[in-house]
Image (cartoon, helix red, strand yellow):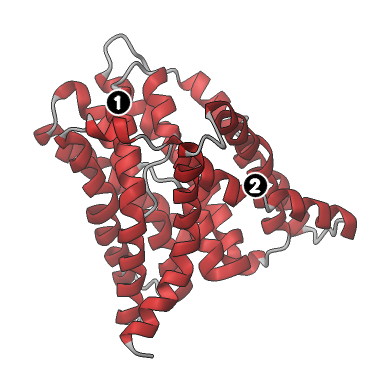
Amino acid sequence: MNLIELFARTLDITLPVFAMVFLGIVLKRLRLIDRAFVSTASTLVFRATLPTLIFLSLIKADMGVALDIPLLLFFALATLAQFFASWLWAYYRVPYEERGIYVQGAFRGNGGVVGLALAAGMYGNYGLSAGSLLLGLVIVLYNVLSVWVLSAYQSGQTTRWSSLLKKIATNPLIISVLLAIPFTALSVELPRWVMTSGNYFASLTLPLALICIGATLSAASLRDGRAVALSSSVMKMIVLPAVSTFAAWLCGFSNEQLGLLFLFFASPTAAASFVMAKAMGGNVTLAANIIALTTIMASLTITLGIFALRLLGWI
């Protein structure tokens, strides 16, 4: 396979995902969708269609393959390393009041939508099932670490661990993972009509979520951007994915494992970081800028990353 064919195959994976994001921008500009639609659709995805997608992908999965303990352990350790590396950099380079927002933007990826969509496009059922398990793990890590760093730099804020634990325990995505495990372990088969209906419903998830991401991007917000947002975005989309993926390769991960890790490491900053920054009284403009910049950068950095890894023969 020559370089042109290899790059074309890479675009076959990434372009469908990011085309839906830019479609969201166009639909918003044409006023075919508005903020009310985005709010309702985002709630539907988070509370219903995405949990359904995760549940169905797990009960259809071969857990002997999807439940990869070394992969999960490495991903957890890498996430912690990214968090502390971002915090260390911010400690010396970022103004005090903006450090929490910077760190959250630099390490908290959108694995639930972008990562999972790319994993499904690249690896099919394996990408969905193994990615869903990674997602269940990372939800816990992202929430705990984000509250910790934000509360450290927001005056009057304290870390309410009881409230945080309650939110994690009632998170629809984590519940869907926990509900799927006994079905998979006991090889329980649902009626065919239930599976078919569930698949129809779950199929709404990725296009709807990606369109909503595009619709929330704001050019006006980007015009108000600052150097801190750009620095956090470069850390999130280039530095940390490159270092973490290389570390994974050194640890012996390759092929589907390494590809899945890269897709989750390289996902743009999660939209939930804006919600948490607002709840904690942080700089919401900075949080929005980081989300917008990383989402725009992702179409280029993820495509080039997959191309480079395939060119090296690592995935």
Q: Is mark 1 on a helix, strand or loop?
A: helix
Residue type at tag 1: Thr
> In x, y percent, where is residue 114?
47, 52
Give the CA distance from mark 2 to mark 1: 33 Å
Dot 2 alpha-carbon crowd within 10 angstroms: few under 14, some 14 to 19, many 20 or more: many
> Which numbered dot is residue 38?
none
Q: Is residue 104 above or below residue 121?
A: above
Q: Which of 263 and 230 is in front in this view?
A: 230
Number of callouts in the render? 2
Using the rendered view, name the quadrant where residue 314 is placed.
Answer: bottom left
Q: Where is residue 32 in the image (x, y as percent from the top left)?
A: 56, 37
Q: In which quarter of the image is residue 87?
A: top left
Residue 177's disc number:
2
Indicate the secondary structure of the residue bearing disc 2.
Answer: helix
Front-most of 16 and 272?
16
Report the front residue among 15 and 71.
15
Q: Mark 1 points at which residue?
A: 285
Q: In this view, does 202 lie to the left or right of 3?
A: right
- Residue 185 position, x and y percent, is 74, 58
> In the displayed structure, would residue 312 be above or below residue 266?
below
Question: What residue is drawn where x is 82% and y is 56%?
Answer: 195
Q: Residue 215: horizontal and vertical position, in percent? A: 47, 38
The C terminus - image quarter: bottom left
Residue sitting at x 31%, y 67%: 304
Q: Earlier in the sequence, mark 2 or mark 1?
A: 2
